[in-house]
Amino acid sequence: MKTESVVIIGTGRLACGCLEACLARSLPVRCVESEKLVFSPLGALCRKRGVSYEMILERDRLASLFLSITAPTLVVSAFNYFIFPKAVLENGALNVINYHPSLLPRHRGRNGPSWSIYEMEPVAGMTWHEARSPVDTGDIIVQKSIQIGQDMTALELAQETLNVAAEAFEEVLPSLVDGSYPRLPLPRAGEASFHRSTDVPNGGVLDLGWAVEKAYAFLRAMDYGKFRVFPPPRVGFLGTQAEVAGYRMQRDCPSAAGGRSIAMLNKQMTMQGDRARLLLNCQ
């Protein structure tokens, strides 16, 4: 199906990048945002570029909008939390594609960057795929891998997946418009996993029995900077649990860390009220 227009539903840098890619090809495009923000970069960009923009928070109104479309339309779900109802996905006028921050079928659902780091995977990535029900099961359009640096936090990995996703979208956009894009069925077995928004690595508690690199992976997986994606991590201390307010890895002898638990390592924990700061040291 050849696309006549594009609807972008999403927020932030990825939605903005997708909009710029569509405008560069002179495609008719409109933008929708389904999350309430104090400031919307997408809304600001639309005003600057003269693009139709709506903020629609009600799920029923969003569904009605997409059900009302009758001309062949590419719907780009770019960092978007609205789950398309079955009736929308069955609207034959729509081709709905979705961005996901992992290499599907690994880490379906929410917070893929965190789970990739927590599970100490060397490589993470992103996927553009066709939207189907259940979520994150549609055919793969394009995937890109990202090396996970030894000190990379969840926030840094999430930002990198957005950058890579914008580049990937620009690459495949011509084939999305003319309907010639590749489709790779999502593997139904093997390394599949699913995480809800309420799922937190190890319940949010640092285990002092972990090897130091595992503990460090946990702390980085929980680390979204000022954004509260998860509650602050906690650590057991003197029979209670303290909030981890800061952490740092000191790599004096990395080769000695493998398999040794934090409790066996030289570590420092300072307390202020019910908050802890950790220094992990493999020396």
Image (tube, helix red, strand yellow):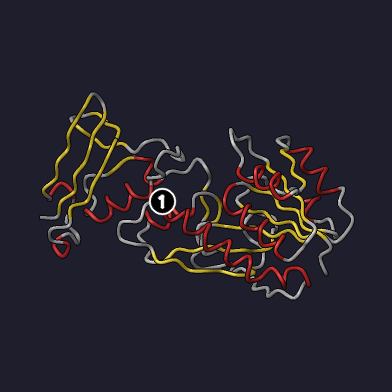
At 38% from the left and 50% from the top, the residue drawn is: 221
The single residue placed furthest to the right in the displayed view is: 70
* Element under disc 1: helix
> Quadrant location of residue 149?
bottom left
Residue 174 position within the rendered picture, expressed as x and y whole percent measured from the top left? 72, 72
Q: Position of residue 192 (x, y in %)?
A: 52, 62
Q: Could you tell whether 113 is left or right of 30 in the image?
A: left
Residue for badge 1: 154
| Residue in the foreground of this view, choosing between 114 and 202 | 114
Q: Nearer the viewer, residue 240 or 276?
A: 276
Residue that lies at the very extreme toward the top in this rendered image? 273
Neighbor class of circle 1 (other Cα within 10 Å; few <14, some 14-19, many 20+) is many
Across and down, in percent, residue 282 comes to 14, 55
Indicate left or right for 58 with 255 as reference.
Answer: right
The vertical placement of 14 against 238, above or below, is below
Indicate the position of residue 253 as horizontal and vertical percent values: 13, 61
What amino acid type is highlighted by mark number 1?
A: Ala
Q: Is residue 182 above or below residue 216?
A: below
Outermost residue toward the front in this view? 48
Residue beneath the point at 25% across and 56% down: 213
> Is 43 situated left or right of 69 in this image?
left
